[in-house]
Image (cartoon, helix red, strand yellow):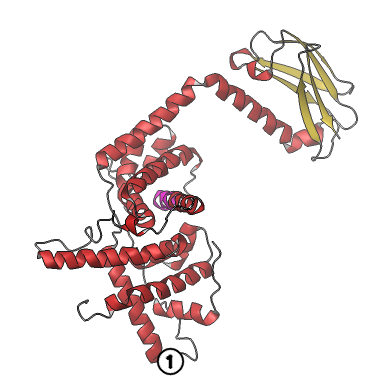
Amino acid sequence: MKDEPISPQDSQMTRWIDALPDAPLPEGINIDEASRERAAAAAVATLLRQHVPLRQDPPYPDFFNAQVLKKIRDEEALLERAPATRQAASWRDVLGQWLRTPWMTGATAAACTAIAIFAINPRPLDEASSGTRVLTVFSPEPNTTTRVMTAADQSAVVVSVDGLSAFPSDRLVVGLHTTEPQSLVASHQP
Amino acid sequence: MSSSYSSPSSTAADPDDPADPILVERCQRGDTAAFDVLVTRHRSRVYGHIVTMVHREADAWDLAQDTFLKAWKALPRFEGQSSFSTWIYRIAHNTALDWLRTRKIEGSAEFDDTVQNHIAAGSTTTPHGESRPDERLAQDELGRRIHEALAELSPEHRAVILLREVEGRAYEEIASLLGCTLGTVMSRLFYARKKLQLLLADVYRSPDWQ
């Protein structure tokens, strides 16, 4: 919604109507006129207070509470029923955050970084399982150290590469999964 | 003008009636029983605000449910920079506002006259007692007029006028609750007052009204 502008005089008048301590009657305003305005505002305020409840319990308040708690339980049960999806999502989230962290930007490769992870029994990452094993990690950068972490119970394999030289933060880091020739390739694109 | 609003939250160090921050901490550890207490404590304000905003009790019920569900999901990220009361109110307000905007986009009759017929106009705040049927009818009629006038306002203007005139909130509180500037609060208040004065002039100028 676009708000209508208010003149400084109307703004001061609004404050005067509300009897704010730092709000004198605006200059050029007739006191009788201003007093009528204030009386009208007070009358409307009284009408509102008389007919609009400040608080109102919802119908069937106990049922209201019970329904809120039921919805919470239903939501939580739904999340528990889909642990694999949740874990896959959280694994992607974690990797995404990790790739976006400043230290990652500073430490990762500039020139040529292609990491090939040769695995057996590859499956899409979402479906990665304990059957996925990383056999070899190759990086063309000589000063890098690589760690492979496999969390079989969480269906995740994380490859951490340290020691790469910095590249700009707007450089895109991509992970590619391929089933042929049974490898996962990660690289950054200029 | 000082704020007449008082938070329903408990601040007493009574173990049977723990304060909101303690309950919030428990909720953050997954304690739904603690959340049940918070719902009980805040539901009348949440529902009251939403029903005044959307003017449909059934929808207000669902939206108040959504509000608490959203709050539960967001509680792990709640850091207590504002009170739970303010925080839940903000969620309730935004939930109602989103709903109203969606309805507006869908072309539904946001200010449809039939909508207001669902409201038990004036029934909640009308002084109780054995009023005569004709007096009760007049009160109901007055309540209907007021709700109709409120429904003529945009949701944003309606929120500001209710926060100011009914809840007695300070400008700064309103700005914080609605996530807008003080200037915006004053502008909305100014125009909302003008419109309501116009719509209700015959009511408050009537010799029968006092």
| Location of mark 1 (residue) | A30
Q: Give residue B127's quadrant in the image.
A: bottom left
| Image position, residue A49 (x, y; %) | 29, 66
Q: Give residue B126's quadrant in the image.
A: bottom left
Residues packed near mark 1 inside 10 Å, few (<14), some (14 to 19) or many (20 plus): few
Residue B4 seen anywhere in this rendered image of the structure? no
Q: Does residue B189 sit above or below B103 in this rendering?
A: below
Q: Residue at x 51, y 21 (%)?
A: A82
Q: Is residue B102 magenta?
A: no
Q: Residue at x 44, y 36 (%)?
A: B28
Q: Is residue B88 magenta?
A: yes
Q: Residue at x 72, y 35 (%)?
A: A100
Q: Tell me the quadrant of the picture where the C terminus of chain B can be found.
A: bottom left
| Amino acid of disc 1 | Asn
Q: Is residue A177 left or right of residue B14?
A: right
Q: Residue at x 21, y 81 (%)?
A: B207
Chain of the residue that carries numbered disc 1 in the rendered image = A
Residue B40 seen anywhere in this rendered image of the structure? yes
Q: Is residue B2 left or right of residue B107?
A: left
| Image position, residue A155 (x, y; %) | 62, 16
Q: Does residue A119 sit above or below B152 in this rendering?
A: above
The residues colored magenta run B83-93
